Amino acid sequence: MSDIAMIEDTVRRTLADALTANVIEAAEHGAWAGALWERLEAQGFLQPAALAESGDLAEGLEIEAAVLRAAAASALPLPIAETALAGWFLARHHLEPPTGPLSLASFAANEALSIADGRVSGRLERVPWGRNAAGVVAMAGGAMLLLDPRAAAITPGVNLAAEPRDTLEFSNAQPIAIGGAADREQMLCRCAAVRALQMAEAAARALEISVEYAGQRKQFGKPIGGFQAIQHQLAAAAGEVASARVAAQQAYFALAAGQNVVFACAIAKARANDAAGTVARIAHQVHGAIGFTQEYQLHRFTRRIQSWRGEFGASALWNRRLGELVLGAPGRTLWSIVASGI
Amino acid sequence: MKTPNFDSRMNQPELARIRAEIREFLANDPSIAKPRADSWSHFDAAFSGRLGRAGYIGMTWPKRYGGGERSSLERYVVIEELLAAGAPAAAHWIADRQTGPQLLRFGTEAQRQQVLPAIARGECFCSIGMSEPDSGSDLASVRTRATRTGDGWVINGRKIWTSYAHQSHYVLMLCRTSDNPAARQQGLSQILVPLDVAGLTIRPIINMAGAHDFNELLFEDVQVPADALLGSEGKGWDQVISELAFERSGPERFLSSFVLLEAFADLARQQPSAESATLIGSMISRLVPLRGMSMSIAARLGQGESPNFEAALVKEMGSLFEQDIGDRLLGEIVPAADPTSDDKFRRLLAEAVLHAPSFSIRGGTREILRGIIARDLGLR
């Protein structure tokens, strides 16, 4: 087993052990899974890129992807992806991450924070675990900032999966730190790649649960997976999962190479968004009524992938951006861009 | 449940040279004046001859058989460039993709010497003799019979949907050579039959696009020598199955309508709109991962693997994609398709829409492919 596969396996086993029914149930009602968080922190999985022995960008990204795949495949109800991303941005700007969970702004084009005399005002909407975060990475005046949610008025909210999505209203707040100049779209792309990876893995798990169920559930004297009507739906879902996974893989390669970043991240998020809808629909259809119940685990995955579709860019945003990117490249044919990137 | 294995990391710079070479070849070739949608079903023997003489057919084969000993990814780059340019590549397509590789895997030295160099020169074309009037998706039910005689085989029966049999030189047949009703997959054999043999009648079938591509082949006491058998008697089914990863995973499973998308991009650059940008983006976001999947399979095929599960996933996603290009353009953007038009976009739209039904039928129907995927998921 390679080091990367070993890390992924370790996180999977840690979560299989620690993510008990009680922890899941409490998180569904808004409780912070503190003991589990501390366990992941002790193992170093909260800043996965920092585990790279070579200190090399590509290795850091590979480790991050491995940890986030395992977390998504377990529907971990903690901001492990947000913390990894925020830590990554802070490290790029040579800022020390505060201890504890971290979160991020949405980096949407219409998200406006203003900064004057070193003080920040404005609203960040739907910040993941804003209420729990020790710091929130955002942008104002073209620079990256680390904000303290405790300096904001917090309006709690949740996504479809009961994960906190809080609105933070800042008024002349003192940032924890101010970094250097940052590119909003590059930050959005980085976040989109992470969400796309999480979506592909959570969708893969929803498919896996559905295949297992179809093999066990009997009707008309045989497992329902023996019926072509079920087989063909699951096969279609498998195609969607495979291409979403490859798209996320391609986005990570682009990030590691520092080439085709907008192109590959836009593709990954658009592909994951579209695959998520199809896979969620099929997974539930195959399960029948049981999949619609609270006690059955399928919804932990389908509610997440449905929620994540709209975060860091829905398909309409990324498809249009992608279209404008390829059509706007002077002297390039569509094919030359497909073949060699942009 | 099996998990498909795709590694989409490719060493693109290594392939840049061959890409530049084939682009230069195509830019100077007269066929490019009229790009075709579904270009690998447009037959042009002269084009295939030029391509073969330039070294772009049988690229991965040993040099002693006229091949180029290039990597499977170099070949991949060439075929995707042909498709992206809309080059009329049907004449040599089957011979290059599957008949040649089958001869390399299962043929005798004499068979290889006899056929492969001519294929590589772009002078010898092949057809697939699998489907019959009563055997489509249920391929193991084939009834065309080859009976051993003193010094060869006598073939009786019918084959159908045999593309370009009227312009090709050989058909690689799947025939029944013995009966075992309990195990239909046994007792099948592959036989390479020259298309000018006595007793063979080739009848045209015109497709809905108005083209003569398909044929029906009637075999009446057709005699071929003993050495027309390819591989082992009775092993035809296993041999045919091993062809399928080659047949199902290539870029022709998602690029058939690409020239149409390129032509639409040309229009969209002249009259920019959010709708056309979004449509193009939505297509590119499906195409790029598919291509990554397909190239990953090409690399594995080059190492002698048979990733049939992954190939089925490419064909499943690929045929949906290439059908959707014409479908969305016709339904959402430009309703005027005209196969006779001088306007490139309208003509390509017509070609793509009229050929689209075949995309999810040829090479294994969508239903057969989904059955294969379901089996690898552990459902059957």
Image (cartoon, coloured by chain):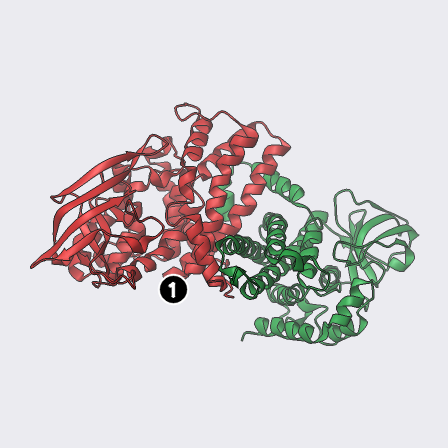
Chain colours: A green, B red
Left or right of B334? Residue B51 is left
Residue placed at 58% from the left, 42% from the top? Answer: B282
Residue placed at 37% from the left, 38% from the top? Answer: B39
Q: Quadrant of residue B52?
A: top left
Examine the rendered structure and indicate whether residue A262 appears above or below residue A56.
above
Left or right of A1? Residue B188 is left
Q: Chain of mark 1?
A: B
Neighbours of disc 1 within 10 Å: few (<14), some (14-19), many (20+) = few
Answer yes or no: is residue A241 visible: yes
Residue nearest the viewer, comparing A243 with A189: A243
Residue B242, percent across and down? 33, 60
Residue A320, percent across and down? 63, 39
Residue nearest the viewer, comparing B248 with B58: B248
Residue nearest the viewer, comparing B44 with A204: A204
Q: How many marks?
A: 1
Identify residue type, mark 1: Glu
Residue A321, percent across and down? 64, 41
Mark 1 sits on what residue? B305
Q: Quadrant of residue A290?
A: bottom right
Residue nearest the viewer, comparing B316 with A323: B316
Answer yes or no: is residue B294 visible: no
Dot 1: element: loop
Q: Residue furthest left?
A: B150
